[in-house]
Amino acid sequence: MPLKDVARTHASRIDRTALTHALVDAVATMLAAIATLLCTLALAPGAGPAILAVVLCISLSRSQLDRDLKGRLEAALVLPVVGLVALAVGWLLRHAPWAGATVFVAGMSVSIWLRRFGAPARRAGSLIALPFVALLTVPHIQPTAGAQLPSWLVPIVVAWLALLWVAVFHGLADRLSARRKVAHAAPALVPAPADGTRLPASTRMAVQMAVALAAAFVAGFLAFPERWGWVVLTAFIVNSGNQGRLDVVYKSGMRVLGAGAGTALALIIGTHAAASPGATTAWILASLFLGVWLRPFGYAWWALFVTVALALLQGFADAAPAALLWLRMEEIMIGALIGIAAAWLVLPVRSTDVLRRRLADALAVLSEAMDPTAEHRQTVAFDVALDRLEQVAAPFRAVRLLSRRRHAEAADWADALLDCRRPARALVDLGQAPAQVRRAIGAARRAQRGPDSLLPALHELRTVLRSAAQRSTVPLAADNSP
């Protein structure tokens, strides 16, 4: 596929509807963060509690734990416990760094390992991970004079405030924008082991994260004792949500590129805003807003803007700006290399296996949506499955742009099936299930056994779906949903 066609195909999916949905999410998230921040500053003034408030709001918004009553209740009960544990770990990281690092690594690994036990355990793992992630930017809570809460109670109250405001603003956004509220309805999919002798993917990813974090702490403590957090944070980011070896390499590249641009931008902003704490705060919040908004369209955007926010937050007072720029880039690159090494050398997960699993899931739910005997036919599950397929497609597209070899066809698989979204939705909305469409779906599912025949089968499915939709009474072009 020519490069201009690749770019046009990918850009067509980033339409105004997708941008609007992402904008609504970003606005709701930042309003929740600002509300939580103001409440936190009134109860416990100080940089630590304020940072914790913003980090928890962003993490809770992304985790989707607030989107139903059960999730809110679970979070309200579990967050105080894990918040106290995280407070203790933060104290250890300050006063006994090696012991704190050991507990941190264990906590993060367990949160990933719990995914193998189903949806409730997965939600518990997400809750456990939230305060530990916050520790990478807020190693200890230290309210200033005038605080109305003891330090041990601060993370609990801040967590409850974050949960409250995230639920309020995201609930309001759902009502006002009529967004599809299905992201929490089905569990995240992980690649299944190839046979009974291999460890479950969640266990392998937990071990990878443990190795990556342990190596990052060692490298950070020994080489960068004052700024070890950048090494550990990068190793965590590139391995978080690991979708295979290629995914980790891709995120590492995006992290380095985005962080480099973000740190340079922060130097420019910091030079002009250093004398005004209010201006610095505004730039930090604006950077986080842009990062949350644009993250669905490319990880590099998130890496860029979160680096701007962190760099402005930590400041440049302890070194010359140019020297500090190279120092931070060095730490980020070391963390990225540690993450890549862990993903490739420790119980590796093949990215192609993950992609093929997502393809299989999407074709299975499309088959159900096209079943004429089904009592309730809808495309919600197919939309969710395609969204998950889109999440793992970016690394393969990057390889396709750089090389015509091994992974290029895998990107074509993903693009061919993603192009089926709109015609499939049009047919289901009309209550139609043409026989030729069902045959094409069946052929595509059978073709998964032989990779060489999969792409032609997916192209045929796309052609049949488009042809059937064009013969319908509703014009295909009328649907502008992502």
Image (spheres, rainbow, N blue to C red):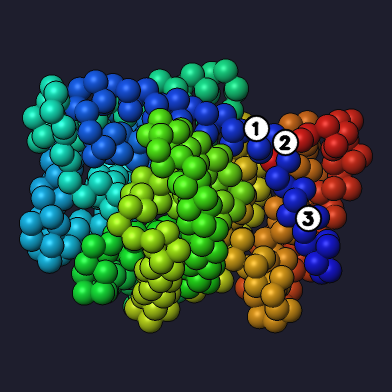
Q: Secondary structure at mark 1?
A: helix
Tag 3 near tag 1, CB within 8 Å: no
Mark 2 lies on a secondary structure that is: helix
Q: Amino acid at mark 3?
A: Thr
x, y percentage for residue 437? 79, 50
**Residue 86 visible from this viewpoint:** no
Can you give x and y, in whole percent of width and height, for residue 289 in the image?
Answer: 51, 37
State yes or no: discs 1 and 2 in contact (Cβ < 8 Å): yes
Residue at image x 14%, y 23%? 146
**Three-letter amino acid code of the residue under disc 2:** Arg
Q: Which residue is mark 1?
A: 20
Q: Nearer the viewer, residue 245 or 159?
A: 159
Q: For mark 2, does the 10 Å Cα neighbourhood hold few (<14), some (14 to 19), or many (20 or more) residues?
A: few
* Whole-percent x, y for residue 95 in the image: 8, 56
Crowding near the residue tagged with mark 3, few <14, some 14–19, many ≥20 C-alpha atoms within 10 Å: few
> Which residue in the protein does label 3 denote?
9
Mark toward the start of the polypeptide (3 vs 1): 3
Front residue of 13/180: it is 13
Q: Nearer the viewer, mark 2 or mark 3?
A: 2
| Residue 424 vertical position relative to residue 8 in the rendered view, above or below | above
In the rendered image, the residue lying farthest to the right is 471
Compared across the picture, whether 139 is left or right of 423 comes to: left
From the image, which quarter does the C terminus lie in?
Answer: top right
At horizontal 52% and vertical 22% (from top left) the residue drawn is 173
Which residue: 11% across, 50% down? Answer: 91
Q: Nearer the viewer, residue 112 or 397?
A: 397
Give the residue pinned by disc 2. Answer: 16
**Image quarter of residue 161:** top left
